[in-house]
Amino acid sequence: MPKKPTIIALIPARAGSKRLRNKNIQSLSGHPLMAYTIAAALQSRVFNRVIVSTDSKRYADIARHYGAEVPFLRPAGLAGELSPDIEWVCYTLERLRDEGTSYDCFSILRPTSPFRQAATIKRAWRKFCTQENVDSLRAVEKCRQHPAKMWLISGNRMRPLLENPAGLPWHSTPYQNLPEVYAQNASLEIAWSRVVFEEGTIAGREIMPFLTKDCEGFDINRPEDWLVTQELVRTSQASLPYISQSSYPLKETRTNA
């Protein structure tokens, strides 16, 4: 029987969000936002370790309160608004390897997807483990804004981003008749660690899809997303992972940039 690969959960939670200030620790139903991703990761029982990558001592304290590890802080140079994921992922995996622990796979679970459940993670891990010759798995959902309805503007003229090679222009075609296109969401990624070290990316070239259901892939980035999140919870249209810990005492934080 083949050996089960080891996997680590990496939860990125830098403190410098601008569009939605302090979004990773905004209070949602009595707990900071990141707590729901930590809870889902732990409850899935998929991971050998659940680690939060943050540049903030305050965020680190909150993460530990909810059961995650923060073995070291992320350097400020890897926590900027434009810092690519490959930098902090590579830094984290290399630091862990230097300290004597390495893992076959890693999963990026972003705190801004609070409706991702333990069952979501388990479903994705099972699918990933059944595939051969893949580098990574990425969560996707059917797009709402189809790229065939998008335009490129040059001066006072514009042209379609995508051209239909035959027949009616796609920009004048009903959505239902357009080719199916899927957009990635931020809820979940899984990859072999070798992809980071050998190819310098977090995804590699052979990427398999993971179709999220209902609100699993909902992502909070802007103030209006926060309002939608609260309404989904209030009306029970979406469920948050269960949290057993007591609430971490948070000072009021503003939800606008």
Image: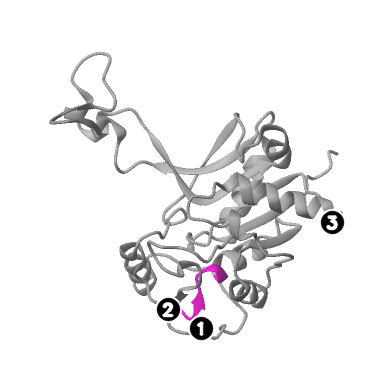
- Colour scheme in use: one colour
Which residue lies most toward the left here? 156
* SS under mark 1: loop
Say which amino acid is labelled 1. Answer: Leu
Dot 3 or dot 1: first in sequence order is: 3
For disc 3, the neighbor class at 10 Å (few under 14, some 14 to 19, many from 20) is: few
Q: Is residue 225 left or right of residue 135?
A: left
Q: Is residue 130 left or right of residue 188?
A: right
Which image quarter holds the C terminus? bottom left
Dot 2 or dot 3: first in sequence order is: 3
Residue 242, x across and y down, in percent:
56, 73
For disc 2, the neighbor class at 10 Å (few under 14, some 14 to 19, many from 20) is: few
Q: Which residue is mark 1?
A: 250
Specify the quadrant of the image occupied by residue 154.
Answer: top left
Q: CA distance from mark 2 to mark 1?
A: 8 Å
Residue 40, x across and y down, in percent:
60, 64
Q: Which residues are magenta?
A: 29-35
User: 176 above or below 241?
Assistant: above
Marks 3 and 2: in contact by CB < 8 Å?
no
* SS under mark 3: loop
Which residue lies most toward the front here? 77
Specify the quadrant of the image occupied by residue 199.
Answer: top right
Name the residue nearer the viewer: 246 or 103.
Answer: 103
User: 226 above or below 163?
Assistant: below
Tell me, yes or no, whether the highlighted magenta stretch contains residue 131.
no
Q: Which residue is mark 3?
A: 99
Q: Which residue is mark 2?
A: 253
Q: Is residue 17 left or right of residue 100?
A: left
Say which amino acid is labelled 2. Answer: Thr
